Amino acid sequence: QVQLQQSGPGLVKPSQTLSLTCAISGDSVSSKSAAWNWVRQSPSRGLEWLGRTYYRSKWYNDYAVSVKSRITINPDTSKNQFSLQLNSVTPEDTAVYYCASSNLGYWGQGTLVTVSS
Amino acid sequence: DIQMTQSPSSLSASVGDRVTISCQASQDISKYLNWFQQKPGKAPKLLIYDASNLDTGVPSRFSGSGSGTDFTFTISSLQPEDIATYYCQQYLNLPFTFGPGTKVDIK
């Protein structure tokens, strides 16, 4: 059974960088059959897939066009986790952020991130 | 991007009622559709994948059908613990996209 545990701050100032981490248990971030996703949810935008990282003999990333210029998702094989960085945040980035496994079958607990000064 | 729509946006039904939710994709997505249940303050929970396959441990009163652009999610006998918002989501193409949700409550 895969379990995902999120960590990171719940308050970020405008123009700064949002950073979250998702620790994986029950699977490997380097699994050649898995992919590791970030999804966010807000009242205005609903559920929005942001991007993913996966390993297929080398590392790959896919990102949503809406955030492509600002987002980085990185694996950390030493800690079996992956991270989300979203740069230059605005109040419109206020949302609950979730990490999720392949096919969105397993989800982290969610982190409410508020962008405010 | 593939747009997902759902109807109705909300419904109210009695315990034991049959509940049906529709989901439509803006283009053919074959069978590549998930259904999720989300309760307040919780992460979405996968109920059905590949349009009609029940995820492990999900009660058999939940079912899904359809392919192409039109899909249906059914609760055969609504239970009090089924009060939640239900979402469809396509995974044929990136970006994965979700429907706006259907809120189900008890009459």
Image: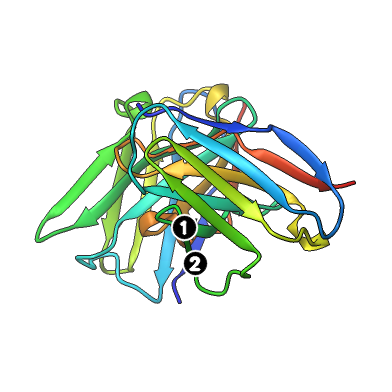
A77 left or right, relative to A109: left
Name the residue nearer the viewer: A95 or B17.
B17
Question: Considering the numbered disc 2 on the image, is that residue within a helix, a strand or a loop?
Answer: loop
Q: Looking at the image, which residue is at 40% across and 59% down?
A: A101
Q: Which mark is residue A95?
A: none
Gap between marks 2 and 1 measured at Cα: 9 Å
Which amino acid type is shown beneath numbered disc 2? Asp
Instruction: State the image coordinates of residue A1 (x, y, percent, origin top left).
Output: 45, 77
Q: Looking at the image, which residue is at 58% across and 38% down?
A: B22
Name the residue nearer the viewer: A112 or B56.
B56
Q: Looking at the image, which residue is at 37% across and 24% down?
A: A66
Q: Which mark is residue B55?
A: 2
Instruction: Report the mark closest to the observer, 2 or 1.
Output: 1
Q: Decide: few, some or many residues near mark 1? Use Cα within 10 Å; few <14, some 14-19, many ≥20.
A: many
Instruction: State the image coordinates of residue B104 (x, y, percent, origin top left).
Output: 75, 45
Residue pushed farthest left?
A: A57
Q: Quadrant of residue A65?
A: top left
Question: According to the image, what is the colour scheme of the structure?
Answer: rainbow
Q: From this viewpoint, is residue B40 visible?
A: no
Instruction: State the image coordinates of residue A43 (x, y, percent, origin top left).
Output: 65, 30
Instruction: State the image coordinates of residue B82 (x, y, percent, origin top left).
Output: 74, 58
Question: Considering the numbered disc 1 on the image, is that residue within a helix, a strand or a loop?
Answer: loop
Q: From this viewpoint, is residue B58 visible?
A: yes
A20 left or right, relative to B15: left
Q: If the image is split into quadrants, where does the N terminus of chain B sit?
A: top left
Which amino acid type is shown beneath numbered disc 1? Ser
Question: Which residue is the site of mark 1?
Answer: B52
